[in-house]
Image: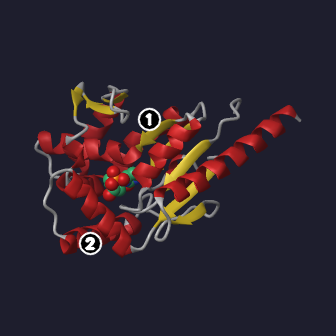
Amino acid sequence: MTSVEPRVAIDGPAGAGKSTVSRKVAEALGYLLLDTGALYRSIALAARAAGHAWVDQDAVSELARGIAARDGIRFEPSASGAPRLLLDGKDVSTAIRTQEIAEGASQVSAIPGVRDALLELQRSVARAGGVVLEGRDIGTVVLPDAEAKFYLTASIGVRAERRFQELLGRGEQPVLADVERDVRQRDARDTMRPVAPLRQATDAILVDSTNMSIVEVVSEIVARVRAVRDMLASEKTR
Ligand code: DC
């Protein structure tokens, strides 16, 4: 690799604060951010629009391969800061954020053909370095040789509460007990699936945010990435 800018992998379960933390880390470092969960959400949305059941492995794999082949998922900068997600040219940034599509994403992401279809896209975004990839299997499967890996987690109660607040903020009317049940179900599915299950890479740094503020989490990760970058730079000049 010629760049000294690390590839940063941030994995962890739903509601650990990954999206916010990853965005702020990418901003602080001036890195590109790829929210890989949005890719699986887009496939779930496209499958529903095409009338395929999320558990229909053949149909959904075929659909994902088609979307990847035609470069059907694109991120476009927007004035609000968060990039817009275009699926076959249509802005689906809001449509992929419902609880229903989160459920669909969890189901389609368990299909090996879907994961395969999205793998190269994720690797090509990361190739030049200076990127943050946020997901479940970045440090273990997508970029096993990433220079900086983090596993961000928090207690189930805290994660459910954060997800609850997030849904409230979007104008939904969630019930906390239901949100907690959904978080548990997604955790179980994400960690127990046979392909690319959610787990901490052996060389990832564990960050438990149960009793940490977003600012503390971000500054810890940014400091560690800077240390890695300095090390890479000094190796290069040696
Ligand atoms: O992070 P998120 O809630 O947007 O992710 C939606 C679903 O996609 C989640 O249930 C797990 C799955 N996912 C995955 O399997 N691998 C990734 N790299 C990212 C997300």
Specify the color scheme.
Answer: secondary structure
Q: Amino acid at mark 1?
A: Leu
User: For mark 1, what is the residue?
Assistant: 121
Say which mark, if any, is on residue 132: none
- Identify the secondary structure beneath mark 1: helix
Determine the residue positioned at 77% across, 36% down.
233
Instruction: Locate residue 109, reporting x and y percent.
Output: 33, 53
- The crowd level at tag 1 (other Cα within 10 Å; few <14, some 14-19, many 20+) is some
| Residue 188 vertical position relative to residue 141 in the rendered view, above or below | below
In this view, the residue in front, 53 or 94, is 94
Determine the residue positioned at 36% across, 67% down.
159
Would you say 14 lies left or right of 57 here? right
User: For mark 2, what is the residue?
Assistant: 180
- CA gap between label 2 and label 1 equals 32 Å
Would you say 164 lies left or right of 123 here? left
Q: Of tags 2 and 1, which is closer to the observer? A: 2
Ligand 1 within 8 Å of disc 1? The answer is no
- Point out the tag, 2 or 1, that comes first from the N-terminus: 1
Determine the residue positioned at 13% across, 60% down.
173
Instruction: Locate residue 218, reporting x and y percent.
Output: 54, 52
- The crowd level at tag 2 (other Cα within 10 Å; few <14, some 14-19, many 20+) is some
Q: Amino acid at mark 2?
A: Glu
Residue 75, picture quadrant: top left
Residue 84, picture quadrant: top left
In this view, the residue in front, 134 or 158, is 158
Q: How many marks?
A: 2
Would you say 108 lies left or right of 195 here? left
* The C terminus lies in quadrant: top right
- Visible residue check, residue 95: yes
Instruction: Locate residue 90, reporting x and y percent.
Output: 21, 28
